[in-house]
Amino acid sequence: MHVVHHGAIEGVTGSCHQLFVDDHRSLLIDCGMFQGAEASERDEERIDFALDGIQGLVVTHVHLDHVGRIPYLIAAGFNGPIYCSPPSAKLLPLMLEDAMRVGITRNKRLIERFLHDLRKHVRPLAYYKWHQLDGGVRLRLTPAGHILGSAIVEIERDDERFVFSGDLGSRMQPLLKDPVSPERADFLVLESTYGDRLHEGRERRVQALEEILCKTLENKGVTIIPAFALGRTQELLYEMNMIFDGIGRKLGCSMLRSIDIIIDSPLAQRFTAIYNDLQQYWDGEAHEVLRYDDQPLVFENLVQVENHAEHIDTIEYLRESKLPAVVIAASGMCAGGRVVNYLKAFLEEPTTDIVFVGYQAQGTPGRYIQESDWVRLDGKRYTIRAARHVLSGYSAHADQSDLLRFVEGFQTPPAAIRLVHGEPPAKMALQQELTQRGFNVV
């Protein structure tokens, strides 16, 4: 077997890997869209590889940089099965429906037709079990701990095993099970997003979030958290619930319940409902919480914004009322979605705080806000007077120590490792660490 990469080999987004199981047959692992600077000079609608012999698509998880090109793949003639975990089978139609509405068409009939076709392709596979595919190929999915439904993919034929990490989660994820290393791999395709850094500890990240919430209360400002609708939003809700339930008292901030927590993302609300419905896939800590709180993603000062009119009214209300509020809205990299309107309204206010809880790809507005004194949004230049915070501990990606632990956890070390899904400094740093430990990075 051998693998050819159609994305995320020289950058972070556009994950798409083609595993040839013999000279004529192959499987795709993910088919994601390019984002930020990596999307420039690319025709997103074009599938630039032949579909001959591709027997199926395996989805590691449903973030758009891993599944966003699926509509174009099907339009190009792909007619095979789409293998994924049971949670991903529920989440994938929602994610692609929203992506099509934003980036392809608002024609409801076309979207419904696509979703009808998509559901005929999807084949949910239970975690932990080996599943027999055509041609003597076996496939196993195990939890990757990145978002609900995320999976490590193992593909085996004639005792040769290729492993694709997908996006691995951090050990500090409070809702999901930690990833567990497979027994062996002849070839490991490993993500390297945070291959050059370490996340702050979970205790520190909760403390930092508390401090920001208290600051919001004191200065009656607006705190904006750009967050992916799936994964990060649910994790933030879970830990804010903990803070509001008593942890904040340590900082003498007993009035935390005076802050409105605004979820301005209908998609995030739908994903949160699915998270609640799939509690069987949560980890042990979350199940302990469920013993005394059957709604750990819901609390009394939570405000959920539904339609566009409510969205505009909410911004105007916050402008005029001068009351403290925390807004969680997509997109996570500030490249579109409702968070952009909040940024345009409050970015130039010194009482505003912007909290980044996830990776900001090069060329995205989120990266500019992190690193520059100004940003251009919808063609207009905005001077950044807001305070900016980066809480790396909330990243859903494994950091360098997590990635090394994953590789070292194989009972038989991988014979070869290919690093993907990382900027050059991150890949280089991780490669050096792996090489020093005796691993073969190719």
Image: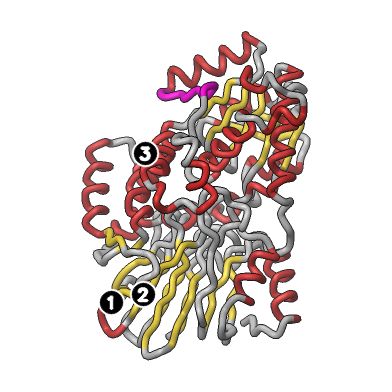
The answer to the question of whether label 1 and label 2 lie on touching residues, with beta carbons closer than 8 A, is: yes
Q: Residue 136's x, y, as percent?
A: 29, 85
Q: Quadrant of the N terminus?
A: bottom left
In three-dimensional space, the C-alpha distance between marks 2 and 3, rounded to whole angstroms, equals: 33 Å
Q: Earlier in the sequence, mark 3 or mark 1?
A: 3
What is the secondary structure assignment of the residue under circle 1? loop
User: Is disc 2 placed on a helix, strand or loop?
Assistant: strand
Task: Tell me the kind of residue under disc 3.
Answer: Arg
Quadrant where the C terminus sits is bottom right
Residue 305 lies in the magenta stretch: yes
Q: Main secondary structure of the magenta part?
A: loop
Left or right of 87 on screen, residue 363: right
Q: Position of residue 220 (x, y in %)?
A: 71, 16
Q: Is residue 28 visible?
A: no
User: Residue 354 sits in which quadrant?
Assistant: top right
The Cα atoms of the two marked residues, 1 and 2, are separated by 7 Å
Frontmost of labels 2 and 3 is 2
- Whether residue 317 appears in magenta in the rendering, the answer is no
Label 2: few (<14), some (14–19) or many (≥20) C-alpha neighbours in 10 Å: many
Q: Earlier in the sequence, mark 1 or mark 2?
A: 1
Q: CA distance from mark 3 to mark 1?
A: 34 Å
Which residue corresponds to the image point at 54% horizontal and 58% vertical from the top-left? 13
Which tag is nearer the camera, tag 3 or tag 1? Answer: 1
- Going by the image, does 42 lie left or right of 428? left
Residue at numbered disc 3? 101
> Which residue is depicted at the point 70% across and 77% down?
434
Q: Which residue is mark 1?
A: 133
How many marks overall? Answer: 3
Residue type at numbered disc 1: Leu
Which range of residues does the magenta coloring cover?
300-307
Q: Residue at x 54, y 72 (%)?
A: 181
